[in-house]
Structure formats: structure tokens, C-alpha cells
Image (tube, rainbow, N blue to C red):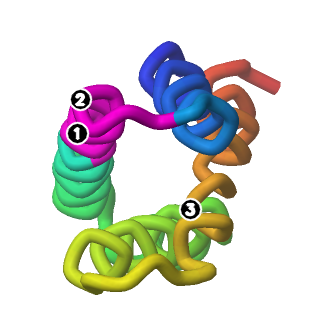
Amino acid sequence: MLTILANFACECTLAQIKATEESTRILELANIIFTVFFCLELLVNMFATMVKEFASDWWNWFDVLIVILSLADLFLTEPTSVRVVRMARIFRGKSFSSRSVPG
């Protein structure tokens, strides 16, 4: 959950500050780190749960979509609207909290 909030803070900072070359480079590096972390987390989730269980949870499909969009953003060279959609990572917090709280 802290990773999601830290990623959200970095995205907000990138969108709001008057970016210098150094600050942009630092925040873009943070974005790469968050994307790698979320990819690894998705892979662990996929292999740790049974396929039927993974596929039946729509939050997992949301995670897959966010990871795909994040990877697309990393590999596209021009700024796109994918960056805006990537902000949807904050909704993964709801996914995490709904899985963590029993009942």
C-alpha cells in the first residue's frame, strides 16, 4: 500500500512541478522502479494463486491492465495519454485493502 501511495506522490509531483532536467530524470527513474515492482508483484500473484482463482478476481484483471499500460508508457518515446491512465495505480490501493481485510 505504501508503494502505491509513493508512486501516486511521484506522479503528482511530476505533473505539478516546474521540471528541471534533474528532477524529471529522478522522477522518471522512480517510475521505472515502480513499474518493475508492480510487474514483479503481478507475476508473484499469478504464480502464487491458482489460475482459476487469479482469473476470477476482477482486481487481478485491473492489475494486469495497469501493468500493461505502465509498460507501454515506458516503451513509447513520445508523451501520451497512457501517463494519465497510469495514475489509475492509486485504485490498486482499494484492491489491496479489499484483499487484506477479512470479511
Residue tagged by mark 3? 86
Q: Which residue is mark 1?
A: 25
Instruction: Pinpoint residue 62: horizontal percent, then vertical percent.
Output: 60, 69
Q: CA distance from mark 1 to mark 3?
A: 18 Å
Where the C terminus falls, by quadrant? top right
Total numbered labels: 3
Question: What is the secondary structure assignment of the residue under circle 3?
Answer: helix
First to last magenta residue range: 19-31
Q: Is residue 25 left or right of residue 73?
A: left
- As shown in the figure, which amino acid type bears the numbered disc 3? Arg
Asked if the residue under mark 1 is in contact with the one under mark 2, i.e. CB atoms within 8 Å, the reply is yes
Q: Earlier in the sequence, mark 1 or mark 3?
A: 1
Picture coordinates of residue 91, whole percent (x, y): 72, 46
Residue at (68% x, 35% y) in the render: 16
Check if mark 3's residue and mark 2's residue have beta carbons within 8 Å: no
Q: Earlier in the sequence, mark 3 or mark 2?
A: 2
**Residue indicated by mark 2:** 22
Residue 56 on the magenta span: no
SS at mark 2 in the image = helix
Residue sitting at x 31%, y 65%: 50
From the viewer's side, name the closer residue of 25 and 84.
25
Q: Are marks 1 and 3 in contact (CB under 8 Å)?
A: no
